[in-house]
C-alpha cells in the first residue's frame, strides 16, 4: 500500500514522506535537519530507514537539510534532475547523487518524472507507483497543460501546489518584481490554477487531494481549501464523500494518506 505524509510544506521548507510496506522515500529535505528528525521520529523512523531522497530542484526550501543529512547518513541514495547533479553533489557529503532523466526505481516503487516550469536549473514533479496504485506530487511550477492532467490522472492521491491567492499577492507587501516572478509561467501555481487542474481531473482516479506549498504571506489554508472546494461544489462533487481535500502545513506534520 502506498502512503503519502506531508511533513513540511510551504515557502520556508518542503518535505514529503512516500511509503510502502518496504520502502521509505523522502521527496525533498527542505527544512531544518533537527525538525526533520523529530518529524520522522513521530512516524517511528530514523534517517537510516530512508531508502532514498528524491529532489525536485535546487532551491533552499527543498534541499537545505541535505548537507547535515548526508554528513550523518552519507550512504543515503539521492536522486536529482540531471542538470543539477553537480549543484547537489557540491551541497552534500553523499557519494550517491544520481541524475535522472526518466523513470527510475527505488525499492518496490517506480518513479515517473514530470518536467515543471520553474525559475531553477531544473525542476521535476514525480509519480510514485506500487502494485498498480499511484500517487503524485507537483509543486513549484508556474503553468500547466494537458500533459500535467495526463500525468496526474492515474493517481488516487495527488499533492498539488496551491501557492497563492491572486488578490493577496497583488495587494501584498512584496516588491513588484517578486510579485511578477511568482505569478509568471516560471513561478508558482495560484489557488485558481490549482482548482483548474483539479477540475480537469474530475472523472479520473483522483480521490484525495493535498494542497501544498502554500505561501505564508499570500495565502491561507482557508482560502486554498475554499477555492478548490467551491470548484468541486459547482461540479456537484461533495467533499468528504466524493473527494477528500487536505491542506499541507508549514509547521505541522500532516495526516498520512493512503
Image: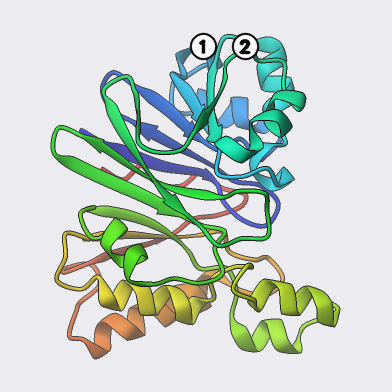
Q: Residue at x 14, y 32 (%)?
A: 131
Please tell me whether residue 134 is drawn above or below residue 166 in the rendered image. above
Residue 44 in the image: x percent, y percent?
44, 21
Query: What is the number of the mark on residue 48?
Result: 1
Q: Are marks 1 and 2 in contact (CB under 8 Å)?
A: yes
Q: Can residue 65 be spotted in the picture?
A: no
Q: Dot 2 lies on which element?
A: loop
**In this rendering, would 14 be left or right of 201?**
right
Q: Quadrant of the C terminus?
A: top left
Packing grade of label 1 (10 A; few <14, some 14-19, many >=20) is few
Q: Quadrant of the N terminus?
A: top left
State how far apart marks 1 and 2 are (Cα): 7 Å
Residue 255 in the image: x percent, y percent?
39, 46
Q: Residue at x 46, y 78 (%)?
A: 193
Q: Residue at x 18, y 41 (%)?
A: 133
Q: Which residue is mark 2?
A: 73
**In this rendering, would 194 be left or right of 217?**
left
Residues 70 and 119: in front is: 119
Quadrant of res 90: top right
Q: Residue at x 52, y 78 (%)?
A: 223
**In this rendering, would 158 be left or right of 177?**
left
Packing grade of label 2 (10 A; few <14, some 14-19, many >=20) is some
Please tell me whether residue 60 is drawn above or below residue 97 in the rendered image. below
Residue 166 in the image: x percent, y percent?
61, 85
Q: Residue furthest right?
A: 175
How many labels were placed on the picture?
2
**In this rendering, would 240 be left or right of 173?**
left
Residues 170 and 246: in front is: 170
Quadrant of res 49: top left
**Which sits earlier in the primary sequence, circle 1 or circle 2?**
1
Residues 9 and 41: in front is: 9
Q: Can residue 146 be spotted in the picture?
A: yes
Amino acid at each position: 500500500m502506498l502512503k503519502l505524509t506531508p511533513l513540511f510544506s510551504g515557502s520556508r521548507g518542503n518535505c514529503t514522506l512516500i511509503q510502502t510496506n518496504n520502502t521509505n522515500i523522502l521527496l525533498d529535505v527542505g527544512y531544518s535537519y533537527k525538525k526533520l528528525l523529530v518529524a520522522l521520529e513521530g512516524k517511528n523512523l530514523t534517517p537510516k530507514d530512508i531508502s532514498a531522497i528524491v529532489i525536485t530542484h535546487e532551491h533552499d526550501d527543498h534541499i537545505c537539510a541535505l548537507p547535515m543529512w548526508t554528513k550523518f547518513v552519507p550512504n543515503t541514495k539521492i536522486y536529482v534532475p540531471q542538470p543539477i547533479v553537480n549543484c547537489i553533489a557540491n551541497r552534500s557529503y553523499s557519494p550517491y547523487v544520481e541524475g535522472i532523466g526518466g523513470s527510475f526505481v527505488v525499492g518496490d516503487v517506480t518513479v515517473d518524472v514530470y518536467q515543471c516550469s520553474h525559475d531553477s536549473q531544473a525542476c521535476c514533479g514525480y509519480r510514485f507507483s506500487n502494485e498498480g496504485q499511484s500517487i503524485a506530487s507537483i509543486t513549484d511550477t508556474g503553468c500547466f497543460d494537458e500533459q500535467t492532467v495526463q500525468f496526474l490522472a492515474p493517481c488516487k492521491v495527488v499533492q498539488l501546489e496551491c501557492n497563492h491567492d491572486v488578490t493577496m499577492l497583488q495587494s501584498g507587501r512584496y516588491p513588484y518584481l517578486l510579485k511578477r516572478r511568482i505569478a509568471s509561467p516560471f513561478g508558482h501555481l495560484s489557488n485558481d490554477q490549482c482548482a483548474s487542474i483539479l477540475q480537469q481531473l474530475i472523472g479520473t482516479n483522483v480521490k484525495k487531494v493535498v494542497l501544498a506549498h502554500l505561501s505564508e504571506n499570500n495565502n491561507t489554508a482557508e482560502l486554498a481549501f475554499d477555492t478548490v472546494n467551491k470548484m468541486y461544489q459547482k461540479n456537484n462533487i461533495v467533499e468528504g464523500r466524493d473527494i477528500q481535500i487536505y491542506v499541507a502545513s508549514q509547521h505541522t506534520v500532516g495526516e498520512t494518506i493512503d
